[in-house]
Image: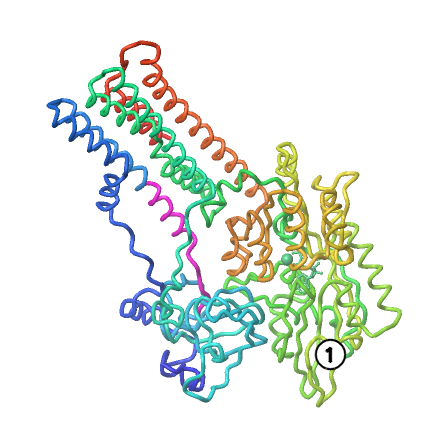
Amino acid sequence: MEWHLSKAEDVILSMAGADGGLSSDEARNRLEAQGPNELQDKPRLPAWRMLLRQFSDFMVLVLMAAAVVSFLTGEGADTVIILVIVVLNAILGFFQEYRAERAMEALRRLSVPQAHVLRDGTACVVQAAELVTGDMVLLESGNAVPADLRLVEAHSLRIDESSLTGESATVEKQTAPIDGVDVPVADRVNMAFKGTSVTHGRGSGVVVATGMRTELGGIAGMLQQDGSSTPLQRRMAAFGRQLSYIILLICAILLGTGILRGEEPLRMLLLSISLAVAAIPEALPALITLTLAFGARRMARQQALVRKLPAVETLGAVSHICTDKTGTLTQNRMKVLGTLDGVGADGLRPGLSMLELAMALNHDVHRRPDGSWSGDPTEVALLEHVEARYGAGTVEALLGDFPRSAETPFDSERKCMTTVHDMGERHVVVTKGAAESVADLLSPGGDREAMVGEAHRLSSEGSRVLAFAYRILEDGSLYCGERDMQGRMSLAGLAWMADPPRQDVAEAIALCHGAGIRTIMITGDHPATATAIARQLGILGEDDATLTGRELDRLDEEVFSRCVDSVRVYARVSPAQKLRIVKALQGRGHSVAMTGDGVNDAPSLKAADIGVAMGISGTDVSREAAHMILLDDRFPTIVRAVQEGRRIYDNIRRFVRYILTCNAAEIWTIVLSPFLGLPIPLQPIHLLWINLVTDGLPGLAL
Ligand code: ADP
Ligand code: MG
């Protein structure tokens, strides 16, 4: 259907029937009729085929050949025993594989994507799979688009459609109808498509297609399956193959010498085959998958959700953890400690300072039905400060009197955010952000330096400082973006808040230190704030350095690579610089875990050996890019996951050694005895039995 041709209102009318989304009853009915909003996966291998596959293994086939041979030579008892062993072996193999598969399945189910929709007229969160046509979906920066939408609202909305169109530049979206029947998908700028992600701004749209009926679903072959084998598994498979060749060679020699010594050829053949079967560690790859999957499950119980199995083993090797400050190391439950008013409200609102007005207007926070705020904790703290002074409901009242007409959303690159509000004919532009960013917007004069100096002083006490600026636009003049405000705004004031470190973080950092893991703080906050918190937490020792984003920009790769080992705190960095830091650390041979929550963090999360996203405060985009998700957003969880990773890695190594030792013992027992003039010590069936008991059962137990 060519939804981009129609007006948004018409699409709503034909899909939903009314504004305000669907009722939950209607949604349930439609879900039944339309099926879940999911792309169809490769069908799962049924259990019986998995069982059957155990018999197609090369070694098992050899063993069955051996059974036939012994049957032909009249060794009826041997035949039966070999067959029993083949079956037992297959059953063990089947259980190992089946459990691994089920553990992986459970992990996948834990990370279901969600969507914000209007149901029964209120905003709520549902699983993306439950979306139906007609649902009104709310989008904001960082969201993955959950279905194909005809956009109804778009505010500076930009979407990354590279997963669909291959085009790497983001697309600016709008809502007006587009003429032309055969407009390519990339040019349908009033639509948002499943599988793409919002990088800027906010908007909403009505669902016009779900599941396999979306553009994404229409592209066959897009359903890429993760290549799910891990580096360790691949290494082990290669190792197993080499080992098999060596063992086959040894068996051939055994057969040759046996026949030369005049042993009965058929008996020798049977013995060689049994030895090969016993000594080749065919269960190893399945065992490793199983170990990793169980490890991942245990980590999930400890609030660390591993999205990609290889991450479990990589975690064990992590030597550097680069972590955000706000929220991960600190409590993120902020409280305004003090404010410094620049000016009165210019008569905009008697009794209220311009600073307080700016706090009340400039934010993206929403009130929950129970009266509490949901949104960025920094902004919540500011609103609570205003309401503590002027009473509950002040914020809504002010927003009603000064309706928002435009905005430039917060972005961790610029480190500020601007909103524009109507006042009759005039408009007021309000900006809040990092002191240096806001200073650039202020008109030149005394205020500027004094404000930056004051912000610095407050930051070195560990406070998080925000600066506010404003400008009144007289009638007729329009807001043309934040950049246009440069050098034209006036200072409204400063606000600073406490964001104390979390209780158990210092302990976790000490634990890392003891285990040879370095913790590095990377934050967008002021260097003085960052340094103060880092000292409290023991990240920053006497000789360690703090580097700011600006200083980092001045260093070339070579110089940076030389000093990267001594830097423990990076402040005022942008997401792009995080990528540089990861690369520099990796260049020094370190294995890096990196946390991130924003859209722009995705590249550094992907580049890190372990990208860690936040389950509570993170964006969908960062979660998609990450290897691991912290369900509780807390630093100690990373440390626990690394511990668990090390344990698993050690266990695998130990188990491999154990198997190799056992198998080597079997080989030497058999192969050496003829050379020592001893009779053959074990019959073929003895060997197979020993193998089953020493490899298969401990494997399952592990
Ligand atoms: P971090 O999460 O490491 O503290 P951020 O990128 O979130 O860093 O913030 C960087 C800086 O941007 C903060 O120090 C603050 O000055 C400013 N800032 C943070 N949140 C907001 C916001 N909602 N609006 C305006 N400015 C903000
Ligand atoms: Mg932040």
Picture coordinates of residue 143, whole percent (x, y) = 51, 65
Picture coordinates of residue 543, whole percent (x, y) = 79, 39
Mark 1 residue type? Asp
Colour option used:
rainbow
Magenta stretch holds residue 353: no
Within the image, what quadrant is residue 591 found in?
top right
Identified at 54% across, 53% down, the residue is 614
Residue 561 vs residue 77: left or right?
right
Instruction: Spot the residue most to the top.
Output: 677
Q: Is residue 436 above or below residue 485?
A: above
Within the image, what quadrant is residue 430 found in?
bottom right
Identified at 62% across, 34% down, the residue is 511
Q: Is residue 116 above or below residue 407?
A: above
Q: Nearer the viewer, residue 686 or 115?
A: 686
Q: Nearer the viewer, residue 532 or 603?
A: 603
Residue 225 vs residue 317: left or right?
left
State the extent of the magenta-drawn residues as a range: 99-117
Residue 91 visible in the displayed image: no
Residue 205 visible in the displayed image: yes
Report the quarter where the N terminus lies: bottom left
Picture coordinates of residue 691, whole percent (x, y) = 30, 25
Q: Nearer the viewer, residue 347 or 11?
A: 11
Instruction: Spot the residue most to the front.
Output: 260
Q: Which residue is mark 1?
A: 484
Characterize the magenta stretch by its predominant secondary structure: helix
Picture coordinates of residue 278, whole percent (x, y) = 30, 27
Q: Residues within 10 Å of mark 1 (few under 14, many from 20)?
A: few
Report the quarter where the C terminus lies: top left
Helix, strand or loop at disc 1? helix
Number of labels in the image equals 1
Magenta stretch holds residue 111: yes
Quadrant position of ligand 1: bottom right
